[in-house]
Image (spheres, coloured by chain):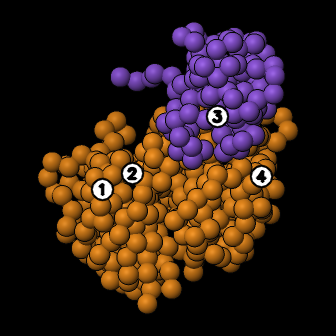
Amino acid sequence: MIQVVLPANLRTLAGVGSVVQLDVTAPITQRSVLDALENNHPALRGTIRDMDTKKRRPMVRFFACEEDWSDASPDAPLPEAVVSGKEPFLIIGAIAGG
Amino acid sequence: MSKVRVLIGTRKGAFVASSDASRKQWKVEGPHFAGWEVYHLKGSPADPDRLYASQSSGWFGQVMQRSNDGGKTWEAVGNKFTYEGEVGTHAWYDGSPHPYEFKRVWHVEPSPDDPDTVYAGVEDAAIFKTADGGQTWGELPGLRTQKSAPGWAPGAGGLCLHTILIDPSKHDRMFAAISSAGVFRTDDAGKTWRPTNKGLHSNYIPDPDAEVGHCVHRIAMHPSKPNVLFMQKHWDVNRSDDGGESWHEVSGNLPSDFGFVIDVHANEPETIYVIPIQSDSLHYVAEGKLRVYRSRTGGNEWEALTNGLPQKDCYVNVLRDAMAVDALDPCGVYFGTSGGQVYASANAGDRWDPIVRDLPPVVSVEVQTLS
């Protein structure tokens, strides 16, 4: 199972805890993980990426295994540690303000 | 026995306050959608337990919420707002053309007779409609493609469509107010729109008497007199006696005619309320005093209502959607402040008491009168 960690505002919107477990069909990529997340929790559609273009919203970041995957190709394979469920895929609300 | 339910949108969630008709003891529930900006929430006149809320965030965009039980529980509904056809441009701050881009829903206006039909006023300025309880939203593009639209320029708060009034005597006639373009009217249920700003005078635009470009902050109407409209403009309070065909100023003896809110007494169509704000640069109440001003003559002659409101060291703002009236007799008047206070008067403004004092900054206040 893929583990996804959501920011607090999206947890309340989706009505989930801090970690969401997802059964994702390979290949495990940003796109397939986000597709599965939105299918399981339709309230999240449009809040992480644009509904039509699927582009990441500007103030949302994606981290995995201590690396920033925000600007990586959505179809790039995610690290093995994410695929195996050992490490989570992190969705972060970007730091903004003072 | 009648009850009232006050729907409060804040910068960090929504709250629902309720009371019996005495309007003395309040039960406050929330926050709903904690941490999200709730620009507006409003109930359906056709089914008072059906509520709609606009929930948004600079990080996570727009979410629409619906309640079928008066705000106890909520479900996220459709949040796809796509401009119809060619998107086109409006004027940017430097005067250059800028593509229309959806940012958020400022105002929801449920239909008077169908709980599944709702209009939404959005930024960048356009009007959308749902007829399926919020699952899908479609634009009424006649407004955004109105011939003056390419020249509309955003004010400091953005190019927002913030007020929608539906004529209760003929629902095909609606008014929409856009900051800072002006008031527009449709007589064919939103297919076509035309500007209705004659008589407005704004010194902050190149032609003070222009047909379009006035920064209208709020318009209000009494249901029994749909041809009479009241307006709080950026500066000036105005009224129209002919359905927006012409306007004249009724600021009279107000200490400042800058402000955001304006509303009409539920049982007296010529009794209106505003809250003067010191100026467009200060955005707090005039003279450090929180005063509601009431005119019983439809404008020009105003009296300060201060009983129960802070009269020194007060520097809050009251935003455009943050005043409402109930339908009881005597009429209840409600408003919320940038300091998180929500005040209620159960006697048309003669005496004010806080419902709640320490909420996040209040963006909107609506009231439902329940039997």
Callout in the foreground (2, 4) = 4
Q: Position of residue B62 (x, y in %)?
A: 62, 41
Distance between mark 3 and mark 1 Cα atoms: 41 Å
Q: CA distance from mark 4 to mark 1?
A: 35 Å
What residue is shown at x 51% (from left), y 22% (from top)? A94
Quadrant in the picture for residue B210: top right
Chain A: its colour in the image is purple
**Which of the two residues, B285 or B298, is positioned nearer the viewer here?**
B285
* Disc number placed over residue B136 in the picture, else none: 4
- Residue B141 at x, y percent in the picture: 79, 47
Q: Is residue B113 left or right of residue A9?
A: right
Residue on which disc 3 sits:
A21
Q: Kindly indicate whether the residue at mark 4 contacts the one at mark 2 (C-beta within 8 angstroms).
A: no
Query: Hey, what amino acid is under mark 1?
Result: Gln
Q: Are marks 4 and 3 in contact (CB under 8 Å)?
A: no
Instruction: Identify the disc placed on residue B341.
Output: 1
Spatial CA distance of label 2 from label 3 is 37 Å
Chain letter, orange? B
Q: Chain of mark 2?
A: B
Tell me, yes or no, if residue B157 can be seen here.
yes
Q: Quadrant of the N terminus of chain B?
A: bottom left
